[in-house]
Image (tube, rainbow, N blue to C red):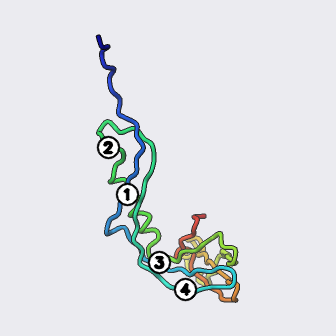
Amino acid sequence: MTSPAAPSSPPKCAFEVQVAKEDFKFHAAHFVAFDGFREPLHGHNYRVGVRLLGNRKIGPDGYLIDFGDVKRVTKEVCKKLNNHFLCPMNSNVLNISISTRVSNNSTTAASEQSPPQQMTLTCQDGSIFSFPLQDVAQSPPQ
């Protein structure tokens, strides 16, 4: 005689999900620098793919993850990186500083806003790059 089956709970499984879409893309500038070498500043058109790995119970709806959430977050990341300079913040060959620009504009509207910040990168070869901080995507994020 067999015992009655216990109510089944959603199975737990290891999973891997890969998502790539035509609109997962961004455009950004960068340069590679390492000891004794720096390439010219240039840009690329990047396409993004997302790979998710994990262990998770399958939800009551039979799905592991909401692809709408994956798409939304990926599009937000691409939007934040689009048309920015990608800055390697942990580089051992770049001297990176962030400063506040002093404005001579004393209008009321300007005084209500926080002063703009500037990122300056000095390379081993003496090259200096300066970007408005809002145009920089810091990696890793600071």
Placement of 100 over or under 125, stated as above or below: above
Going from the N terminus, do you reach mark 1 or mark 4 first? Answer: 1
Residue in view at x 55 percent, y 76 percent:
110
Residue in view at x 53 percent, y 71 percent:
137
Going from the N terminus, do you reach mark 3 or mark 2 first? Answer: 3
Q: Marks 1 and 4, how far apart in space?
A: 32 Å
- Residue type at mark 4: give it: Leu
Tag 4 secondary structure: loop
Label 3 sits on residue: 28
Instruction: Select label 1 or label 4 by which is in front.
Output: 1
Mark 3 is surrounded, within 10 Å at the Cα level, by few (under 14), some (14 to 19) or many (20 or more) other residues, namely some
Find residue 12 and report its image quarter. top left
Residue in view at x 32 percent, y 43 percent:
63
Q: Are marks 1 and 2 in contact (CB under 8 Å)?
A: no
Tag 2 secondary structure: loop
Label 4 sits on residue: 41
Instruction: Tell me residue 18's x, y (percent).
Output: 37, 57
Mark 2 is surrounded, within 10 Å at the Cα level, by few (under 14), some (14 to 19) or many (20 or more) other residues, namely few
Q: Are marks 2 and 4 in contact (CB under 8 Å)?
A: no
Placement of 18 over or under 114, stated as above or below: above
Tag 1 secondary structure: strand
Label 2 sits on residue: 63
